[in-house]
Amino acid sequence: MKKIMVFLATVLSIHASNAQNNKPAARLASPTAIEMIQVIGGSFDMGSDSGAVDRRPAHTVKLNNFSIGKYEITQRQWKAVMGTNPSYYENCDECPVTNVSWADVQTYIQKLNDATGKNFRLPTEAEWEFAARGGIRENEMNMKSFAGKKLLQTIAWYEANSKDRVHFVGRKRPNQLDIHDMTGNVEEWCNDWYAKGYFSAKDVTNPKGPETGKSKVVRGGSWNSEESEVTVIRRAAYVPESKSNYLGFRVACDQ
C-alpha cells in the first residue's frame, strides 16, 4: 500500500508539473513582460496594384531586423503599467486593451520603457505589413490576403464569427512567424502619419511615413470588420485622438 501511495504521489507531482509548464506564456510572465517575435529583415512588395487608391502602387520596401509583439497588448498588461483599464469590455484581462488613443499609447510605451529599461515603440506601417505577411519566410506569397495561410475562420476574429465582441489574444492560429491576431480581433495603431498618395513606385528602405499629417495609420481590421477589411494591405486612417472598442495596438522594437 505504501508503494502504491508513493507511486500515486509521484504521478500527481508529474501531472502538476506538466500543467504548470503548459500554461500560456503570457500568464506565466510578469505583468509588464511582453513576448516578442524577432523578424529578420529583407525586401518585400508592400501595397497592391489593385483595390483602393491608398494601397497603390505595389512597391519594393527593404527593412532592417526588428521585433514585434506576438500578441496585441492586453488589458492586464495595460493595467500593470497605467493602473486603469479604459476598455469597453472590462474584466477580460487577456483580451486586447481598447478605447486607447494614439497619445494614450505613447504614454503607456514611455512608462513601460521606464519600468523595463527597454525601447518599445509602435511598429511602422511597413514593419506591420511585413510581419503580417510572414516576413522573408513568405516572400513567395507576398500578395496573399491575410496574416496566415489558413482559412480566415481559423486565424481571425471578424464580423462573421466574433459574436460582436473582442476575444482573448492568441486563441486563433498564428501566421508563419508565430504572430497572432494580425488579422482581426482589434485594429492596431501604427506609428506613421497617414497620407493617401504617399506610396510611389520607388524602392524605399525603412520607411517611416510622412513627416506630418492629420491622421495616423491603423492596420489589421477588427472583430467588427467584414472579410475585405481584414486583409494585410487594408489601410485605415484615424485622427490620433480616436478611441473605440475595436481599436488597440501591439508594440515593436529595434534589434
Image (tube, grey):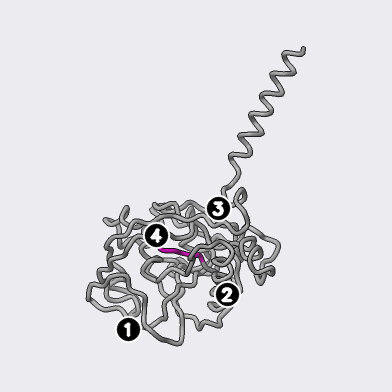
| Tag of residue 171 | 3
Q: Position of residue 29 (x, y in %)?
A: 60, 51
Label 3, label 1: how many angstroms apart (C-alpha)?
A: 36 Å
Q: Position of residue 3 (x, y in %)?
A: 72, 13
Instruction: Note whether 10 is above or below 182 in the view shown.
Output: above
| Residue appearing at x 69%, y 18% in the figure | 7
Say what amino acid the circle numbered 4 marks: Gln
Residues at marks 4 and 2 touching, judged by CB atoms closer than 8 Å: no
> Residue farthest to the right?
1
Circle 3: element type: loop
Instruction: Note whether 144 is above or below 209 in the view shown.
Output: above
Label 4, label 2: how many angstroms apart (C-alpha)?
A: 22 Å
Q: Position of residue 143 (x, y in %)?
A: 30, 63
User: Which residue matches tag 1?
Assistant: 197
Magenta span contains residue 188: no
User: Which residue matches tag 2?
Assistant: 107
**Observer-nearest of 211 and 22:** 211
User: Which residue matches tag 4?
Assistant: 255
